[in-house]
Amino acid sequence: MNHPTLTIDPGAVAANWQALAARHAGEVAGVVKADAYGLGAALIAPALAAAGCRSFFVATLDEALSLRALLPAARIGVLNGCPPGEEETMRARELRPVLGSLAACARWRGAAGDDEAPPSFLHLDTGMNRLGLDRDEAAHLIAHPTLLDGLGLTHVMTHLVAAEEPDASANAAQRERFAAFAARFPWLRTSLANSSGLFLGPGFGSDLARPGYALYGGNPTPTAANPMRPAIALAAPILQIRAIASGETVGYNGTWRAARPSRIATIGVGYADGLPRSLSNRLTARWQGKIIPVAGRLSMDLTTFDVTEHPDIAPGDVIELIGPGHDIDAIAAEAGTIGYEILTSLGPRYRRVVKSV
């Protein structure tokens, strides 16, 4: 290996989707927003489709247009809805907006003229307080259900706040609020669970689940072993190893000081490549299965490790940053963030290698 390399396994993503589909009675979509969580929608979406996935979700119209070019027959939902003035574009490409306000509903219906509007989703906010119908709008729709006429609605959906915490009271509260609203519109199918929601039990089943993170190998059950297959690996060769004396420092501002004569290995990966700078003096990596700690602050293009305990390590040897011994959730914990951020931050400078099925 001569370059920092991100290995992507679309077969693992497809297998993860199949595993999730097997545990859910309703349909299971594939969430491929943010360029398939950084792995590349052009690679991942066709793999999911080949595995049997028929419905997909993205965040934005531009993402949806790109996905439509890849998958002409797929059902594509746009989570952020239809930007005002783009209704005809969405209609022409058969894209399905998630309608999250009465105003958005009115625009979607109005753009259809005298015709039934194309298919769409209705988003009920049950506690996230970002997008979706608020309590007053939901109550207004219950009192005036004909406002939904002509919208082409297929599903009502909501988004769980704390599904990765099985004991969180918000889970049951959201489920009950969602069920009460959905019961008023029995002709609409439902969409409830995200990745972690699929592991909350049968009470969180619906007609359409929307997993994302778990597809890419993230652990949907943080309090238990990860049931998903890893979908990426990240490694980089050592550029140089230098010996330093006790008392010398490494990196910007000298935040790491050698307590003994030490050997420092440098790799060509830094925060410009998506490793959070918060990993400074906290990151661990692997060399031949052995743990090696970071030494000092991450730089834009370089990261340094203390390899004093490993006299056989040499320039050109490969350091594993993400892999079987140190997955995306582990590196996220070291960074004080979540695996979602790690995945979606992985930069374009890596040599990307697709693992063959």
Image (spheres, grey):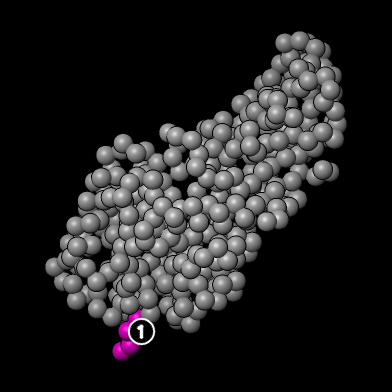
Give the overall secondary structure of the magenta segment. loop
What is the x, y in percent for residue 50? 58, 66
The answer to which of 229 and 110 lies nearer the viewer is 229
Using the rendered view, name the quadrant where residue 270 is placed. Answer: top right
In the figure, is residue 111 to the left or right of 183? right
What is the x, y in percent for residue 142? 17, 66
Note whether 59 is above or below 308 in the view shown.
below
Does the segment drawn in magenta span residue 264? no
Note whether 172 is above or below 22 in the view shown.
above
Give the residues in magenta: 110-117
Asked if residue 174 shows in the view, the reply is yes
Amino acid type at circle 1 is Ala
Residue at x 61% of width, y 26% of height: 282
Q: Given the current orientation, which residue lies at the most extreme front position?
A: 22
Using the rendered view, name the quadrant where residue 221 is placed. Answer: top left
* Quarter placement of the C terminus: bottom right
What is the x, y in percent for residue 4? 76, 43
